[in-house]
Amino acid sequence: MSATSRAAPGSRVNSFKLVLLGESAVGKSSLVLQFVKGQFDDYRESTIGAAFLTQTVVLDETTTVKFEIWDTAGQERYKSLAPMYYRNASAAVVVYDITSGSSLEKAKSWIRELQRQADPQIVVALVGNKSDLAERREVETEDAQRYADEENLLFMETSAKTSENVTAVFEAIAKKLPLEKPKPARAQNNVNLQEQGTTQEGCAC
Ligand code: GTP
Ligand code: MG
């Protein structure tokens, strides 16, 4: 069973930096708000600079992933700040709005930038948000899926409004990250946990 919740006692917490990128108003902040707090606002202020939040995903009783999330501002005037946030990131969620073809083009340009400049091991998810607005759809699921397959990206359509697939995106990313598994009980006998920097942390949201 997987869930977003406090780490199970004895489970190893793996922390990863994750960045959200995408055109303004595609719903990056809304996705994070839904993932971290289970809330949605019909009206949200555009992000200024970037926002930082954390959330944990419990993959199983021994493995917890803590995401340190940088929610960047999509407005063009903040574009030059983005490298500061994707540098050293282990994962990126590149968001477009399924009702806006141009927002997919913008997402593709972020993906090209990540491929050129981010860590080569970065796990990238392409996310088509606002799936609840299917009657206004401009981007076909198959077209985005084909592009994601070609570029070796995770792909999902989400709704920050209804919460459809929101946790699923972060869980799929968590499963692709290089996780440290706890050592078998016998091998742990001689290990000084403090020296290893092992901590047990819960959700800091
Ligand atoms: P910037 O901070 O400017 O980069 O924008 P953003 O990508 O963070 O977008 P934000 O989350 O602020 O959402 C923009 C608008 O879209 C808000 O009015 C949200 O309520 C709305 N919105 C976000 N996600 C969804 C969704 O899944 N469905 C619907 N119907 N509306 C959404
Ligand atoms: Mg925002």
Image (tube, grey):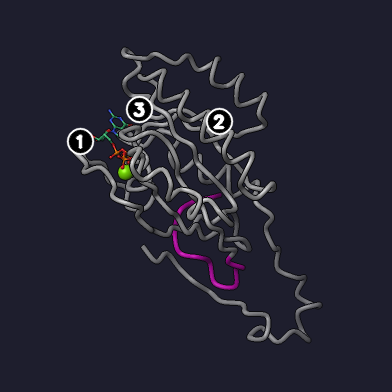
Residue range (magenta): 1-13
Which quadrant of the rendered structure holds the C terminus? bottom left
- Dot 3 surroundings within 10 Å: few (below 14), some, or many (20 or more)? many
Helix, strand or loop for disc 2: strand
Q: Which mark is residue 42?
A: 1
The three-letter amino acid code for the residue at tag 1 is: Asp
Disc 2 marks which residue?
A: 155
Image location (x, y in percent) of residue 116 = 64, 40
Q: Is residue 44 left or right of residue 187?
A: left
- Label 2 close to label 1 by CB (< 8 Å): no
Q: For mark 3, what is the residue?
A: 130
The quadrant where residue 133 appears: top left
In the image, ligand 2 is in what quadrant? Answer: top left
Q: Residue at x 49, y 37 (%)?
A: 94
Disc with the residue nearer the chain's start (2 vs 1): 1
Residue type for callout 3: Lys
What secondary structure is marked by label 1? loop
Q: State whether label 3 is within 8 Å of ligand 1.
A: yes
Which residue is situated farthest in the left direction here?
A: 43
Residue under the point 60% across and 26% down: 148
Total marks placed: 3
What residue type is disc 2 on? Phe
Q: Is mark 1 within 8 Å of ligand 1?
A: yes
Q: Is residue 21 left or right of residue 182?
A: left
Q: Pinpoint residue 51: horizontal percent, then vertical percent.
A: 35, 55
